[in-house]
Amino acid sequence: MSTLSLMIFLPIITAFALFVTKIHINIVKTLYMIVTGIVMYLAFSLYVAFDANASMQFIEYHPWIAEYGISYHIGVDGVSLGIVMMNAIIMPLVAIALYKQRDKRGYWINLLFVQGGIMGAVLSLDLMLFYLFWEVMLLPIFFMIGLFGYGNKHFITMKFNIYTILGSLMMLIGILYVAVQYKGQFGVYSFDLYDLKNVKLGARESFFAFSGFMLAFAIKIPIFPFHTWLSETYRSAPTGAVIVMSALMAKLGAYAIWRFLFTLFPETSHALAPYFIGIGLFGLIYFGISAMSQSHLKKMFALSSASHLSLVVVGFFIYDVYGLVGSSYLIVAHAVSSTALFLMAGMLFERTKTYHIDSLGGIAAVAPKFALFFAFFALSIVGVPLTAGFVAEVLIVLGAFEYDIYVGFISATTILLAMLFMFKMISQVLYGKVSESAKNFQDLRLHELIALIPLALLILAMGIFPNYFIKKIEPTAKSFAAGKEAVYHE
Amino acid sequence: MSNTFIALAVPALLLLSAIFILLFGLSSYYTKNRAYYITLATLFIAFFISINGIGVLHSAEILPQIFNSMIVYDTFSATFISLFLLGGFLTLAIAKSFVDKTNFFTHESFVLFLLSLFGMVILTMANELLTAFISLEIASMSVYILVGLNRDSLKASEAFFKYLLLGSFAASFYLLGMMLIFAQTKSTNLDVIAEYILNTDLNSQLLVVAGSMLIMITIMFKIAAVPFGAWVLDVYEGASLPITAYMAGVFKIAIFAFALRVFLKDYITFQAIYDPLIIGGALITMAVGSLLAVIQQSVKKMLAASSVVHSGYLLIAFASTGEATSSAASAIIFYLFAYFISAIGAFGVLSYISKGSDNLINYDDLNGLAKERPIIAASLTVFMLSLAGFPSTIGFIGKFYIFTSAIEAGYTFLAFFGALSAFISIYYYFKVIVHLYFKESGHLEVDYGYKVSLAFIVISALIVLWGGVGTSLLLDIPGINALNALSKYSLESLGL
């Protein structure tokens, strides 16, 4: 088995094995740490071995359902490498931070399962394989919210599930439609991305197939107006699930737009790009303003995360090297920051038993270390210089200016919106009079520090030495943009 | 083993075993339990005889000088016969606790069980309308009585009468249709009719068209397609759980097998006339079935209603047989595999946890099962996911084939509506999972016993999973490709 397959199936198989055996929770946790540790090690070795001058590599190909040309076809390139790394790094750190709090086997089994599922979806180059993983990774989240969530969790997890599957099914019809057209034009079935991109579709057909795919991705990210599941789901989901959803699954949606839509429907994507840039910019403002008015910490983070993902979508749709590199970079940067922030929100809740910004305050006086990290991660989300988000946002804004001066102007100014609500939140939560709930606030414990410090270091490293990371993305971005350049920027 | 031997041995074995139990069942030595094991053994042996006929291409009329080409044994029938026998075996094996704990499962019920299987076996081999009718009635009659097995239950009696009256009424359409076809073609043999249809101008064979339509009504009735399926909820509700499983998982598939043979041999020529009807039927079947399934309070009735939706999916593929014959027809066969194993498993779990009670199994009865019985809950979850068409289960591959064939035939909107009703089905199937895993139970831990039944449930669940991801790359067990090849072979053996 190659490295990539191992990274997909080791967590999944371990999850199955843990499910059918009844072993003590401590052994489950230890196994979780070992497996995610191995995956992290594999990911680092992958990163080192990744050839910075090539695009798609580590390709593995086996026929799966021969009759329909469905294959087990995986590979990694500069854009997917970022998500793979995040998936591998975040999972063990989450476990370290939550080590003491979560004593249910299901929690850890589901996290392992979702890690494998996300890994598979990121690496798939076959549409059916992608669909399989795309759907399968939903189940653990469904179970995690239903089992370990808060509030009206049964209703919310069902709503989230149904909402997401509606998108997926429409994507399925899109996939099948494209594949059948391929059969009509080339005589054989294939679901391989590189085969299907040769299909010639009429404008109307292409638009409908595009919409099917886009619906699935738009719901998952979510972009306006498919966000109605978002804030409630994030609010009632347990910390582990929220991190997976905001840091990995949402990113996967944005990544899939680039990977599948831009490859399969280049003309349609390009023709519709202005609309999606518009929706993205609108989402940026809309989610930003909504976030400002939230008094629930997790809901606020949810909306701020949606706001940044809208920016990622804008970056992809502006179609050039800056936008693509910026968006890929923002995917990683935001994944790290939001993981850390949601982890800290979880710690906050564990200590104060509240998520309400109004009933918090003055934590900095009681717990300086907590305040330092909290402020740092909140600032890294809005893209303060020296953090990873800054580099990414600058790149996207540069790309936006290249695309259109007004788009550039709007995206540059609206990014500032995030500053507003984040600073407001920081001042309310950390400073001011010491509130009732924060009186006995315990500062960060050792295992929490162990989880947070690597994330902080990563953010700084990505902010200060962006070249080292960007050079892995660049070949992919250039080869992509070169192809587009020839077509669109005569 | 020669094919003639298989074709004769399987029905003969079923029939002889039925007669044996019937004759000796009243003696004190042959208790209910012994009859149960004799039935199981019969099915087991017959299954192992019949699987010799699958996977290789063959087609021959059996003893034409005696049966006058009424019976054809080909890969198609071999595949389905194996499926019925496996289905009958699994149903009974899982229902062990049910059989033990109820007093209405007497030795006669096993006779009826075997006779109904005998009828289905002949039905799939029938190459002639009259033989098909007789075997269909043998199977139907036995199933009617099996439905009403529990004489003390008012619901069962109601179900029995409803099914008997409506079923016989529907069967009369078949007779009328057959008569009309015979009046014009002077034959009831499918091959002869097919030849006549091909060689005659479409406008001058009105009787054949009308007759075929009448036969189609009977088929639609038996597969519970809307608007002919009004009986299905009450009958599935009234019948005891193993019988419901048997009807949904096995009997329905027998009807589909026969329908497929008639469709592909005869109807295909005037597909253009039928397509609008079948498309309309598929749409309202899916819509009404979904609606019914959503509003049910009991899991058993929900599964009954959802079986209507599954008939709707199959009708999509039937509508597509005209344009994309090979892929649509093999999609139907694969979907039947998928639905067969999922339905048997789902109903089997219900019958296992109901322990022979008359209980309908409401959603609330499943609360907290995951905590007490993780294996049962996980198996039921797998079956629900498969029925909902969730990827990594065999049900997804089935839906994938059906939707692909629909798009290939140019009916993208049908695939779209299929996906919509699959979307609705997520709600009612996942509701089961919500109750299994998320709700706290009020009742005490129950010991279900019967580890063997449990083992068969787990095996079915594993088949469902393996059928969804299985590949010979990992293990040398027949996976998706092998099942697909199986359906292709059985299709080719029809000699179209």
Image: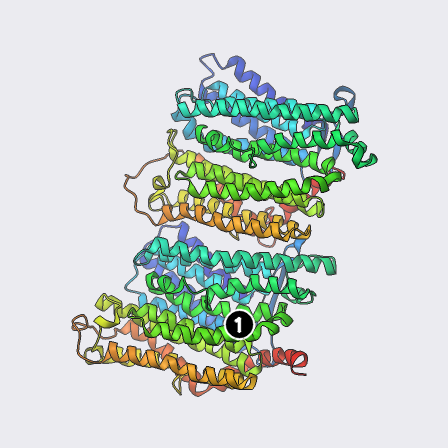
Circle 1 Cα neighbour tier, 10 Å, few/some/many (<14 / 14–19 / ≥20): many
Residue B19 in picture, x, y percent from top left: 57, 16
In this orientation, which residue lies closer to the viewer: B41 or A363? A363
Which image quarter holds the C terminus of chain B? top right
Type of amino acid at the residue the image marks with label 1? Ser
> Extreme right residue here?
B199
Which image quarter holds the N terminus of chain B? top right
Q: Is residue A462 left or right of residue B14?
A: left
Q: Which scheme is used to colour this image of the protein?
A: rainbow
Residue in the picture at 54% in, 27% down: B41
Q: Is residue A381 left or right of residue B479?
A: left
Residue at the spot of label 1: A80
> Relative to B300, is A143 above or below?
below
Residue B263 in picture, x, y percent from top left: 69, 36
In this orientation, which residue lies closer to the viewer: A27 or B98? B98
Residue in the picture at 18% in, 70% down: A437
> Relative to A454, is B170 above or below?
above
Among the 4 quarters of the image, the one containing residue B154 = top left
Residue in the picture at 67% in, 26% down: B132
Element class at badge 1:
helix
Among the 4 quarters of the image, the one containing residue B133 = top right
